[in-house]
Amino acid sequence: MCMKKIIVLLLLTSGLYAQEQVFNVQRYCIDEQPFKQGECNITGNEYSFVFLDTQKRDVVFFLTATKMKYKIVDSGIFSQDRNYTFYTLENENEQVEMRVNQQHTKIEFLYPNNHIYLTVGKSTKAVN
Protein backbone atom coordinates (compact mmCIF):
# COMPACT_ATOMS: atom_id res chain seq x y z
CA MET A 1 0.00 0.00 0.00
CA CYS A 2 2.85 2.41 0.76
CA MET A 3 4.35 1.80 -2.70
CA LYS A 4 1.03 2.74 -4.32
CA LYS A 5 1.00 6.05 -2.45
CA ILE A 6 4.56 6.78 -3.56
CA ILE A 7 3.66 6.08 -7.19
CA VAL A 8 0.63 8.36 -6.99
CA LEU A 9 2.70 11.14 -5.43
CA LEU A 10 5.35 10.79 -8.14
CA LEU A 11 2.71 10.99 -10.85
CA LEU A 12 1.11 14.04 -9.31
CA THR A 13 4.39 15.86 -8.87
CA SER A 14 5.43 15.15 -12.46
CA GLY A 15 2.94 17.69 -13.80
CA LEU A 16 0.27 15.19 -14.81
CA TYR A 17 -2.22 16.39 -12.19
CA ALA A 18 -3.68 18.88 -14.67
CA GLN A 19 -5.08 16.11 -16.84
CA GLU A 20 -8.83 16.02 -17.39
CA GLN A 21 -9.47 12.38 -16.39
CA VAL A 22 -7.47 9.81 -14.47
CA PHE A 23 -8.33 6.14 -14.92
CA ASN A 24 -7.07 3.79 -12.21
CA VAL A 25 -6.47 0.44 -13.91
CA GLN A 26 -7.41 -2.52 -11.72
CA ARG A 27 -6.54 -5.31 -14.20
CA TYR A 28 -4.92 -5.58 -17.60
CA CYS A 29 -5.11 -8.32 -20.21
CA ILE A 30 -2.72 -8.41 -23.18
CA ASP A 31 -3.74 -10.48 -26.21
CA GLU A 32 -0.75 -10.99 -28.52
CA GLN A 33 -0.92 -11.81 -32.21
CA PRO A 34 -2.44 -14.09 -33.50
CA PHE A 35 -5.48 -12.59 -31.78
CA LYS A 36 -8.07 -14.82 -30.14
CA GLN A 37 -11.22 -13.21 -28.80
CA GLY A 38 -11.13 -13.03 -25.01
CA GLU A 39 -7.69 -14.61 -24.66
CA CYS A 40 -5.00 -13.12 -22.44
CA ASN A 41 -1.38 -14.02 -23.08
CA ILE A 42 -0.32 -11.72 -20.22
CA THR A 43 -2.46 -10.55 -17.30
CA GLY A 44 -1.81 -8.57 -14.18
CA ASN A 45 -3.05 -6.10 -11.65
CA GLU A 46 0.06 -4.01 -11.06
CA TYR A 47 -0.67 -0.36 -10.53
CA SER A 48 -1.38 1.26 -13.91
CA PHE A 49 -3.04 4.51 -15.02
CA VAL A 50 -4.45 6.19 -18.10
CA PHE A 51 -4.50 10.01 -18.18
CA LEU A 52 -6.90 11.43 -20.79
CA ASP A 53 -7.00 15.13 -21.57
CA THR A 54 -9.37 15.81 -24.46
CA GLN A 55 -8.77 19.58 -24.30
CA LYS A 56 -5.00 19.25 -24.72
CA ARG A 57 -5.55 16.16 -26.92
CA ASP A 58 -3.10 14.10 -24.83
CA VAL A 59 -3.17 10.53 -23.56
CA VAL A 60 -0.54 9.12 -21.20
CA PHE A 61 -0.69 5.39 -20.47
CA PHE A 62 1.34 3.89 -17.62
CA LEU A 63 1.37 0.10 -17.82
CA THR A 64 3.40 -1.07 -14.83
CA ALA A 65 6.91 0.30 -15.52
CA THR A 66 6.20 1.50 -19.09
CA LYS A 67 5.08 5.03 -19.98
CA MET A 68 3.48 5.70 -23.38
CA LYS A 69 2.53 9.22 -24.41
CA TYR A 70 0.26 10.01 -27.37
CA LYS A 71 -1.50 12.85 -29.15
CA ILE A 72 -5.18 12.41 -30.05
CA VAL A 73 -5.50 12.83 -33.84
CA ASP A 74 -9.14 11.72 -34.19
CA SER A 75 -12.05 10.72 -31.96
CA GLY A 76 -15.74 9.86 -32.15
CA ILE A 77 -18.37 7.28 -31.32
CA PHE A 78 -17.33 3.76 -32.36
CA SER A 79 -19.76 2.77 -35.13
CA GLN A 80 -19.78 -0.97 -34.36
CA ASP A 81 -20.61 -0.48 -30.66
CA ARG A 82 -22.10 2.91 -29.79
CA ASN A 83 -21.28 2.23 -26.12
CA TYR A 84 -17.62 3.04 -26.92
CA THR A 85 -15.80 6.24 -27.82
CA PHE A 86 -12.74 5.73 -30.01
CA TYR A 87 -9.56 7.77 -30.09
CA THR A 88 -6.90 7.49 -32.77
CA LEU A 89 -3.58 8.15 -31.03
CA GLU A 90 -0.09 8.64 -32.33
CA ASN A 91 3.41 9.42 -31.20
CA GLU A 92 6.74 9.48 -33.02
CA ASN A 93 6.87 5.65 -33.08
CA GLU A 94 3.36 4.37 -33.76
CA GLN A 95 -0.34 4.87 -34.23
CA VAL A 96 -2.86 3.06 -32.03
CA GLU A 97 -6.61 3.03 -31.50
CA MET A 98 -7.96 3.47 -27.98
CA ARG A 99 -11.58 2.73 -27.04
CA VAL A 100 -13.29 3.78 -23.81
CA ASN A 101 -16.77 2.58 -22.85
CA GLN A 102 -19.39 5.12 -21.76
CA GLN A 103 -19.31 3.85 -18.15
CA HIS A 104 -15.52 4.41 -18.04
CA THR A 105 -14.97 0.88 -16.74
CA LYS A 106 -13.20 -0.58 -19.79
CA ILE A 107 -10.41 0.79 -21.97
CA GLU A 108 -8.85 -0.95 -24.97
CA PHE A 109 -5.54 -0.12 -26.68
CA LEU A 110 -5.44 -1.81 -30.09
CA TYR A 111 -1.84 -2.02 -31.31
CA PRO A 112 -0.90 -3.86 -34.53
CA ASN A 113 0.84 -6.72 -32.63
CA ASN A 114 -1.18 -6.80 -29.41
CA HIS A 115 -4.41 -5.65 -27.88
CA ILE A 116 -4.44 -4.41 -24.30
CA TYR A 117 -7.74 -4.61 -22.41
CA LEU A 118 -8.00 -2.63 -19.18
CA THR A 119 -10.55 -2.91 -16.41
CA VAL A 120 -10.87 0.40 -14.62
CA GLY A 121 -11.73 0.72 -10.91
CA LYS A 122 -14.31 2.91 -9.27
CA SER A 123 -11.65 5.49 -8.45
CA THR A 124 -11.93 6.97 -11.95
CA LYS A 125 -12.55 10.68 -11.56
CA ALA A 126 -12.27 13.99 -13.29
CA VAL A 127 -9.48 16.18 -12.00
CA ASN A 128 -10.18 19.90 -11.69
Image: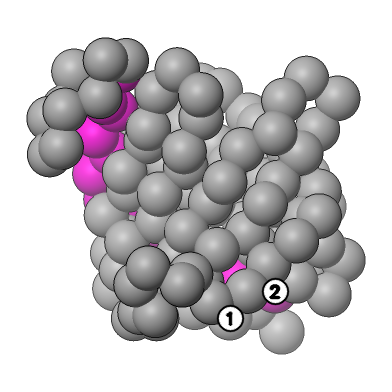
Q: Which of 80 and 60 is in front in this view?
A: 80
Q: Residue furthest front?
A: 80
User: At x 72% / y 25%, what residue is drawn?
Assistant: 94
Indicate the amino acid at tag 1.
Answer: Ala
Residue type at numbered disc 2: Glu
- Please provide percent x and percent y for residue 109: 47, 42
Residues packed near mark 1 inside 10 Å, few (<14), some (14 to 19) or many (20 plus): few
67 is higher (above) or lower (below) than 2 = above
Q: Decide: marks 1, 2 in contact (CB < 8 A)? A: yes
Question: Is residue 6 visible in the rendered structure shown here?
Answer: no
Image coordinates of residue 8 in percent, x first then y, are 54, 49
| The one of 108 and 20 positioned closer to us in this rendering | 108
- Residue 27's spot in the image, x, y percent? 24, 44
Q: Name the residue under label 1.
A: 126
Q: Residue 20 carries which label?
A: 2
Image-based side of 56 in relation to 120, left or right: right
Which quadrant of the structure image shows residue 81?
A: bottom left
Is 30 part of what is drawn in magenta? yes
Is residue 23 shown left or right of residue 2? right
For the point 83% across and 75% down, the residue is: 55
Question: Residue 53 shows which numbered tag?
Answer: none
Taking depth in this image into account, of 6 and 42 the one nearest to the observer is: 42
Query: Callout 2: few (<14), some (14-19), or many (20+) C-alpha neighbours within 10 Å?
Result: some
Q: Which of the image's four quarters has the C terminus?
A: bottom right
Magenta region, mostly helix, strand or loop? strand
Q: Is residue 38 magenta?
A: no
